[in-house]
Image: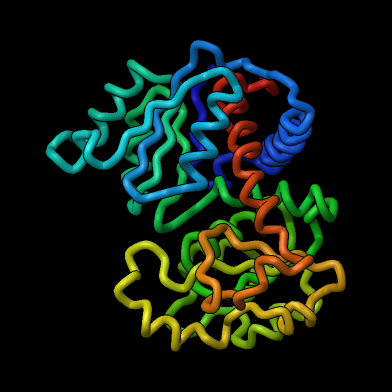
Amino acid sequence: MSKRDFLSLLDFNPEELGHIVGRAKEMRAMHERNELYQPLKGKTGALILQLSSTRTRVAFEAGFAQLGGQVIFLSPGDTQIGRGEPISDFARVLSEMVDIIMIRTPAQHDIEVLAEGASVPVINAMSSVLHPCQLLADIQTFEELRGPITGKTVAFLGDGYNMCHSYINAARQWDFKLRIACPDGHQPNSEIFASCANAERVIDPREAVAGADLVVTDVWSSMGHEGEADQRRATFGPYQVTEQLLDLAAKDVLFMHCLPAHRGEEVTETLLDDPRSAVWREAGNRLHSQKALIEFLLLNPKA
């Protein structure tokens, strides 16, 4: 069986993505029943986080433990990346010692080089371009609460950055309509946007949210943009998601945010606790969707 990587949602076909999300739902149910399932005994993963993380680290470490395996966490100071060792060499060394590699780093190119050099599966745990693992959890959450997302309308408000890019890819793979409301100068990558016939950009956030089944946002100052926080608050102010804005969406709308959220900025102080918010279940589903992804990559139950 040849190894597979998960660097983008586009690395899998819709059927495979549907299988992973379906398994994630099953794994959540198994977890709630306290059902022991440990097919990864003897397996080891390397978790490389060159950027700070809460949900990504806890989800991968807890998930591996629940599946019977173990994870070695590598911080920026624990590796020779950036201190002279080529990433391709690093990939070959790790492949001799672990069964799978998860990496979170700003540079999508570095993830791609790592995957090319590794003989074990590589997972993109987030880059400045894409955040595919988050989308698995988001789709799982929507479908658990509202049924299939195919044919639905999703509104993304805010920065056309990595989360926006992954929603564009998700609209392709799950065939839902995506409206993106973002200010000029902060629109998504033109090539990624053009690749999805289901995506459209609108200026007015009210137009984007009108009748939407799912409303999503992200922080205004993502990694690498912290120094622009004051300017971005002024630019993105009209794109704040409020309870009143959600009132324009479908009656059974869900709201999601990949977290951490800056209450009072991209969302009001109280929105995360609104009955229409699914952010806590969404965060929890990072655990189960990533377990399903690891199972697929290491055991490939569909093979």
- How far across and down, in percent of the image, does residue 276 sit? 77, 66
Image quarter for residue 195? bottom right
- How far across and down, in percent of the image, does residue 206 sit? 70, 85
Q: Is residue 192 above or below residue 234?
A: above
269 vs 207, nearest the viewer: 269
Q: Is residue 78 above or below residue 188?
A: above
- Number of marks present in the image shown: 0
Q: Going 79% across and 80% down the picture, which residue do you hit?
A: 247
Q: Is residue 163 above or below residue 78?
A: below
Q: Is residue 109 above or below residue 128?
A: above
The answer to whether residue 165 of the structure is visible from this angle is: no
- How far across and down, in percent of the image, does residue 173 sit? 67, 51
Q: Going 25% across and 36% down the picture, which residue do you hit?
A: 87
Image quarter hosting the C terminus = top right
Left or right, 205 with respect to 266, comes to right
Image quarter hosting the N terminus = top right
Left or right, 40 with respect to 106, comes to right
Left or right, 38 with respect to 121, comes to right
267 vs 159, nearest the viewer: 267
The answer to whether residue 191 of the structure is visible from this angle is: yes
Residue at the left extreme of this rendering:
84
Q: Going 76% across and 33% down the picture, which residue do you hit?
A: 32
- How far across and down, in percent of the image, does residue 210 sit? 77, 80
Q: Going 66% across and 44% down the picture, which residue do you hit?
A: 285
Residue at the top extreme of this rendering:
42
28 vs 205, nearest the viewer: 28
User: What coloring was used for the rendering?
Assistant: rainbow
